[in-house]
Amino acid sequence: MKKLFLPTLLGIGALFLLHSCGGDVKTTGNNDRQEQHVEQEINYASVKIGTQEWMETNLDLAFFCNGDEVTEAKTSEEWIKAGENGTPAWCYYAQENKEKYGKLYNWFAVIDERGLAPDGWHVPTDTEWNVLEEFLGTNIGKKLKSNTDWKSDGGGDNSSGFNALPCGARSADGNFNLLGIIAYWWSSTEKNEKTSYVRGLANDSNDNWRGAFPKQGAFSIRCVKDKADL
């Protein structure tokens, strides 16, 4: 598999248990925000790929399941501070593309015990990404990538229905990188205290890429259906 380029990210973190909204999470009593989370949940179409069911678009939620707000980091300074403090945070790469590309999150949002994924869904583990790859076989990138938005005619045929768009990423220093060129998604599996596993695609390859990046970076989230619901 071809290794993709991304500027070095710095990060610290610890492993927590990942809960979906159906799990046991502390409720703050903010019913309006909880209802908003539920309203947003129902907008996610899905596609079955092998034995799994995946969302067709990236996650775009600003609240945890209990109604607590996920911090929006609008400036580089805010993004750096969130990473240094281990604070769950999200951002948009570009406002004009927010509905198409969804939010970018740091890993602290991925594993927060209040639950970010909608009810019945969860952020995939590294092993669940492996299952997807094994089912698709060769030329995985071509099968996952959309046939639009990728620079230099680097799109795929989207034969899987996954519809991967080149959303770019944000590094730990707050800089945005590679819109139209790469797509990265978090897994819920950490490699060590500082890094966690991601999956990535690039416009110049039909492969997919697995690597570990520091937890203060910002990547997309693509949820998979809880196994019991299939």
Image: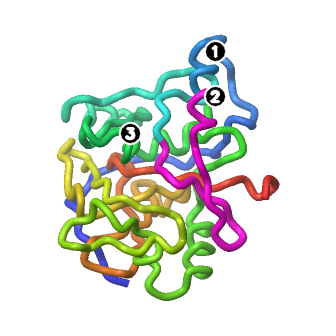
| Segment colored magenta | 39-59
The residue sitting at 38% across, 39% down in the picture is 99
Q: Note whether residue 208 is visible.
A: no
Q: Residue furthest bottom?
A: 138
Tell me the SS state at disc 3.
helix
Q: Earlier in the sequence, mark 3 or mark 2?
A: 2
Is residue 219 depicted above or below 69 in this figure?
A: below
50 magenta-colored: yes
Q: Which residue is mark 3?
A: 99
Q: Which residue is mark 1?
A: 28
Is residue 26 depicted above or below 135 in this figure?
A: above
The residue sitting at 75% across, 32% down in the picture is 24
Left-right relation of 82 to 37 = left
Q: Report crowding for label 1: few under 14, some 14 to 19, many 20 or more residues within 10 A (C-alpha).
A: few
Q: Earlier in the sequence, mark 3 or mark 1?
A: 1
186 magenta-colored: no
The quarter of the displayed image where residue 178 is located? bottom left
Closer-to-camera residue (35/114)? 35
- Tell me the quadrant of the picture where the N terminus can be found: bottom left
Q: Report crowding for label 2: few under 14, some 14 to 19, many 20 or more residues within 10 A (C-alpha).
A: some
Tell me the SS state at disc 1.
loop
Q: What kind of residue is marked 1?
A: Thr
Tell me the SS state at disc 2.
helix
- Tell me the quadrant of the picture where the C terminus can be found: bottom right
Q: Earlier in the sequence, mark 1 or mark 2?
A: 1
Residue 5, horizontal then vertical, whole percent: 23, 69
Residue 216, horizontal then vertical, whole percent: 34, 46
Is residue 65 depicted above or below 130 in this figure?
A: above
How far is disc 3 from disc 2 in space, using C-alphas? 18 Å
Closer-to-camera residue (3/59)? 59
Q: Which residue is mark 2?
A: 38
Q: Note whether residue 209 is visible.
A: yes
